Amino acid sequence: MNLATDIWAKVLELMQPDMTTTTIHTWFDDATAVALEEDRFVLYSPTRFKRDIIATRYVPFIQKALHELFSTDFDVVVLTEGELDTYQQPAKSSFLPGTEEYTFERFVVGSSNKFAHAAARAVADNPGHSYNPLFIYGESGLGKTHLLYAIAHTIHNNHPDYKVVYIKGDTFTNELIQAIREGRNSEFREKYRGADVFLMDDVQFIAGRDSTQEEMFHTFNTLYELKKQIVFTSDRPPKEMLRLEDRLKTRFEWGLLADIQPPDYETRMAIIKNKAIRMGVELPEFLLQLIAENITANVRQIEGTVNKIMAYQDLMGDLVDKETVVRAVKDMFKEKSDIVPTAEVIIDEVCKFYNIEPVVLKGQGRAKDISMARQIAMYLIRRMTNLSLKEIGKEFEGRDHTTVLHSIERIEDLSKNDPEKAEIIKDITANINIRYE
Ligand SMILES: Nc1ncnc2c1ncn2[C@@H]1O[C@H](COP(=O)(O)OP(=O)(O)OP(=O)(O)O)[C@@H](O)[C@H]1O
């Protein structure tokens, strides 16, 4: 048995309510599954006559069942005698090996990501001519990189001659520094300004760095004038990138801004189902619900949990009873410290660390240690809770959201460049997490 055969058995089962048993026997008894591809399901039916009937009458039912299983759309192809030999699996995109799975077909669409998905598709189908630049933003783990790779694969497949360049914001910065140091500026320029499609992930990392922003500005202008497609992803919209030069901010907003929100309950269910079935397992409804109810913030965590459950089932076999599984899953949630701490607890732990009173931390004092502690508290609240910048400001005597953002960006910088501060942040985070164990 392979995955395609398993899926075909499930499809037949799901079609039962829609047709009589005789219909199923007549048309499908000798049909077999050939392949489950990225976005196509390939069937084989031994006679031309039956093939034509299936293709004209039953494909929509098969598609409906596939959608029920995967929550994504599939084409259905039915082959018959003589056609099997010439059938070939489509070649997978060779753009960036290891990223082949990040396709549009595997992206589950729900209300939280519908807009970003549609914009990415439009850009992939018509590079340089729909939205330029496309700027996708949202919190970590919600599928921004997935969409960026999907754009890259689609364009690479449709236009193998296009030079598609994918680069992360921080890699761009590092490469530039190295190129300047080694006197290879023109090589660097050529590489990026010569792209047909320029995809930059996590563009927020170029903010605050003068030479990078200067280079980005010229790269952008060259590509834009040549009508080359530009796509950025970021954890925040351009206007919240405070240390980004204005001339870049405005350019990033020239095209289309598309945000991705955390998935709602239905989308979470669909993502879990899709993930499980791709791994060849069907999870019982109660497990689907349990995960969807408990893991809410982030698709990466959802995937991690499904993987763990698979591993658990592998170890324990299919015979584990419901209570045991529920207990194990709940333990997993705890382990992953999915419990979101409150702002109060975070403030409390920062105060303990710096040995100051919460009123002082929240107040207006400007002593060096106090303002550092305050900024760390804001940073940790942003990172560990779902509070918005405005809501965080309220915790600190109504400071406005730009002040909060400044503090967060400062600590983000320090946590990268100052090992001692990074250590402090790690310690406080651990202290906060311990409170929830
Ligand atoms: N709608 C979706 N359907 C299927 N898988 C998804 C979806 N959204 C996210 N994922 C999966 O979740 C994981 C995290 O997504 P991704 O890496 O694209 O997030 P991101 O927004 O780029 O995060 P970061 O900012 O941390 O880089 C990936 O494995 C991705 O395939």
Image: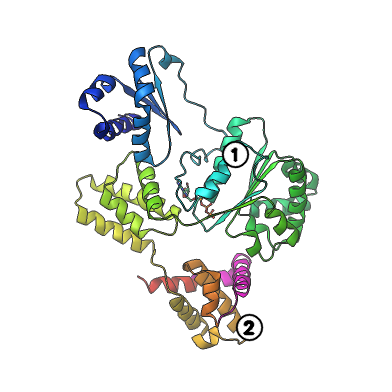
Span highlighted in magenta in the image: 398-426
Judge whether 394 appears above or below 269 on screen: below
Q: Secondary structure at mark 2?
A: helix
- Residue at 58% x, 31% y: name it: 157
Residue 157 seen: yes
Q: Amino acid at mark 2?
A: Lys
For discs 2 and 1, the disc positioned in front in the rendered view: 1
Return the residue at label 1: 124
Pinpoint residue 302: horizontal percent, then vertical percent: 40, 53
Q: Quick one: 191 or 275, which is closer to the camera?
A: 275
Q: Is disc 1 placed on a helix, strand or loop?
A: helix
Q: CA distance from mark 2 to mark 1?
A: 49 Å
- Whether the magenta-drawn stretch holds residue 108 is answered as no
Q: Residue under label 2, please give it.
A: 368
Q: Disc 1 marks which amino acid? A: Ala
- Residue 196 picture location, percent across and down: 69, 38
